[in-house]
Amino acid sequence: MGKVLIIGAGGVSQVTTWKCAMLPEVFEEICLASRTKSKCDKIAAMLPRPIRTAQLDADNVEETVALIRDFQPDLVVNLALPYQDLSIMDACLATGVDYLDTANYEPPDTAKFEYSWQWAYHDRFKDKGIMALLGSGFDPGVTSVMTMHALKHHFDEIHTLDIIDCNAGSHGMPFATNFNPEINIREVTAKGRYYENGQWIETEPLSVKRPFEMPEGLGTLNIYLMYHEELESLAKFVPGLKRARFWMSFSDNYLKHLEVLQNVGMTGIEPVEFQGQQIIPLQFLKALLPDPASLGPLTKGYTCIGVMVDGIKDGKRRKYYIYNICDHQACYAEVKSQAISYTTGVPAMIGAKLMLTGAWRGEGVFNMEQFDPDPFMADLNRFGLPWKEVFDRSLED
């Protein structure tokens, strides 16, 4: 069916590459590339069939162009850092190859992310006759598709939505992040932001919280209001939306450690001089913290990520919750990775599959909300992320 170049060799990439390798009828050839080739080789050694590996500095457009021309993929899957989105998109433009990522662009020197930089590529991709699919992870990604599934099948109008991301798992470490520490901490320490009545409202970091009772007896966690990129695309692509918020759970232990690290300046992104060298504190902290890929065998428990929707169907108010529960240990048994990487890596494979098979096609730059949700939702059930729906029947009386 096609050839895929996967860039990045972290925990998410391990899952995506493994899942692609299990579908040779779609992913006929795979090349896995990263700045550190040994990481690619380690992943390759786990897989059920041989793949090619390569060393690549994805910040270097010419180097990426050279690898694309050598391997000649049909699709580039960007699972590197968000800082590298634009350089990889530039390489895809230069070579006329489709592009997919899981997180929107973030400039290294500013703790900020938004779609404007990547949306600006739309006309150039369209003129080149190629496609870019943005945010094919879980959140963003699955949460956006879940919202469009709800709109297509269960609502005439969506008025409010709340994306709720809970990790009820435990790895037993004093302090660790479940995905790239640098990106995780930049995201968590940023100001909260949500969409309401056509405006964006800011809150102080983690200043708004509430308890959330997870389904299926998983317990109650505190969830905190944050900003996440899919709010921007949902506000753009869901007609009549009045409010959209994103919530994530954090343990008291995680927040205590984070507060101390902030207080001593270890989460800073401005360079400081140390023994005659310029270092960025957060990047130094990243080097000290456990590699998220190492947490797989240690992590037990579940993730629970979903979307709560409130709106109108046939003139009546309707409330609805759609979610996925993922078992950390089951993920490790399948692909030697914990559920945080799994819930992002599987949707990346599904998005790539839909592009290569032609189920999702277009010329230009697209978000997940712009395509038919049905084939993606069917593949979630097929490839390890089954979802469930709950309706608030009290409103139907």
Image: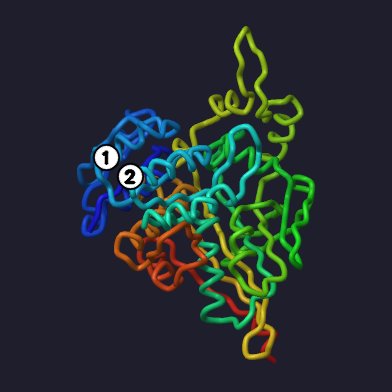
Amino acid type shown at disc 1: Arg
Q: Which residue is painted at 42% across and 58% down in the image?
A: 126
Indicate the secondary structure of the residue bearing disc 2.
helix
Q: State the residue position of label 1.
A: 69
Q: Which part of the image, by quadrant, shows the C terminus? A: bottom right
Q: Please name whichever residue, 367 or 38, is drawn nearer the observer in this view of the structure.
A: 367
Q: Please name whichever residue, 95 or 170, is drawn nearer the observer in this view of the structure.
A: 95
Residue situated furthest top in the rendering:
276
Q: Which residue is painted at 58% across and 41% down in the image?
A: 106
Amino acid type shown at disc 2: Thr
Q: Please name whichever residue, 259 or 68, is drawn nearer the observer in this view of the structure.
A: 68
Q: Position of residue 352 (x, y in %)?
A: 36, 56
Q: Which residue is painted at 67% across and 26% down in the image?
A: 270
Crowding near the residue tagged with mark 2, few <14, some 14–19, many ≥20 C-alpha atoms within 10 Å = some
385 lies above or below 269: below
Q: Is residue 80 visible?
A: yes
Q: Are marks 1 and 2 in contact (CB under 8 Å)?
A: yes
300 vs 51, left or right, is right
Q: Which mark is residue 95?
A: 2
Q: Please name whichever residue, 218 or 379, is drawn nearer the observer in this view of the structure.
A: 379
The answer for how far apart the CA atoms under marks 1 and 2 are is 7 Å
237 lies above or below 113: below
